Image (cartoon, rainbow, N blue to C red):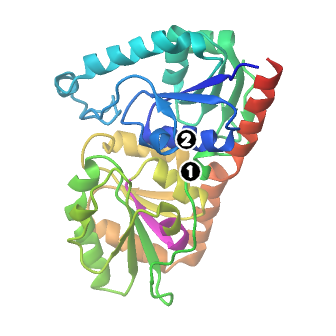
Amino acid sequence: MAQKTILFISNGFAEDLVGARLVRELSPQFNFLAIPIVGEGRPYREAGVEIIGPCWDLPSRGIAYGSEFNLKAEIKAGAIQLYWGKIRALLKNRRQVDLVVGVGDYLSVLVSGLFIRKPIVYLWVTLSHFDVAAKYFLKKYAVMIFSRWASWTHLPEFKVEFLGNPHMDTFEITGNDFGLDKSLKTVGILPGSRQPAYNNLPILKEIIKLILARTKVNFVFGLSPRIDRAEFETIEGVSLSYKFGDVLAVSDLVLGLAGTGNEQAAGLGKPIVTFWGGGPSREEELVKGHARAFLKGAAEVLPPEPNLVANTILSLLANSAKMGEMGRRGQEINGGRGSTKLIAERIEQWLKSN
């Protein structure tokens, strides 16, 4: 029997992580290809997956909306050449593809429907609208649709299954406690994975300074692999780590400026404090919208005012009942590990019978 080929199409770093995790759960008897719509596709490379088409980061890092999106900067950085190269790669490789796995919002469905035209398993893990074209391609090509939400209002005309939240499977918890003082509360800080992580550094430093002036607290930064650690080593009295899962595990509360990272923290039952500002993807309307969709009742969403943020964190740390309630709400919306293994089993069953 000829080896079957699965093509992963994902549009974002967090979505690439989900795709790469699914690859690790699938049998090595299959051939894997991937085309990250944005970014460099690092998670796929680390999973040993062949990436088709060109890959490089654009200034927006894939955030093509919001008031700070700059189309001219995207074009100057080679956006036209990048996406034309991806289209050519899709057309060149489509004959060998037996199944597409789309991860993210509706864009992965559109790309698959326009250029591959093969059966698709769609992992709906990102807030998304579905236009007429996306629904047409889902109706024509989708063999399974999995949602990261236990309940949903979109796509009522389709069979959508919930097996858990795939984002919760993309990090490991090894038990590293970073040598923190266990008698103190711990605040985990997720600065994000894009330029705002650097832009917000002065505010984060001021927040830490204000809190430490009033009480002793452990601070540990959970850094994305896309972030330069050296920029954060100027902060005194904090721990830095790329062990994202361990940072979440030791935290009593998370000061989160991430997107998916905030959702994952909430999924582990951690109350979230966040503030808007700092650049693309951190505009007020986007941060508030994200919190409404993924962090309802689990997060305090604030303006970028250090005193207000520091006071809110201190107030929550002193109120275990409120932190517990926020944690429970976050788990209800974002919890549920183990779904990628279940989805992999379903994909293998389909490929064996088709």
Residue 60 percent location from the top left of the image: 28, 34
- Observer-nearest residue: 101 or 67? 101
Residue 8 percent location from the top left of the image: 55, 28
In the rendered view, tell whether residue 236 sits above or below residue 94.
Answer: below
Looking at the image, do the residues carrying marks 2 and 1 touch, with CB atoms under 8 Å apart? Answer: yes
- Observer-nearest residue: 323 or 221? 221
Give the extent of the magenta segment: 247-257
In the rendered view, tell whether residue 141 sits above or below residue 329.
Answer: above
Say left or right for 334 vs 216. right
Secondary structure at badge 1 equals loop
Q: Residue 255 magenta-drawn?
A: yes
Which circle marks residue 170 in the picture?
Answer: 1
Residue drawn at x 28%, y 54% is 197
Residue 74 percent location from the top left of the image: 22, 26
Residue drawn at x 70%, y 33% is 29
The amino acid pointed to by label 2 is Ala
Residue drawn at x 56%, y 70% is 322
Q: Name the residue under label 2.
A: 20
Res. 110 visible in picture: no
The amino acid pointed to by label 1 is Thr
In the rendered view, tell whether residue 255 sits above or below residue 199.
Answer: below
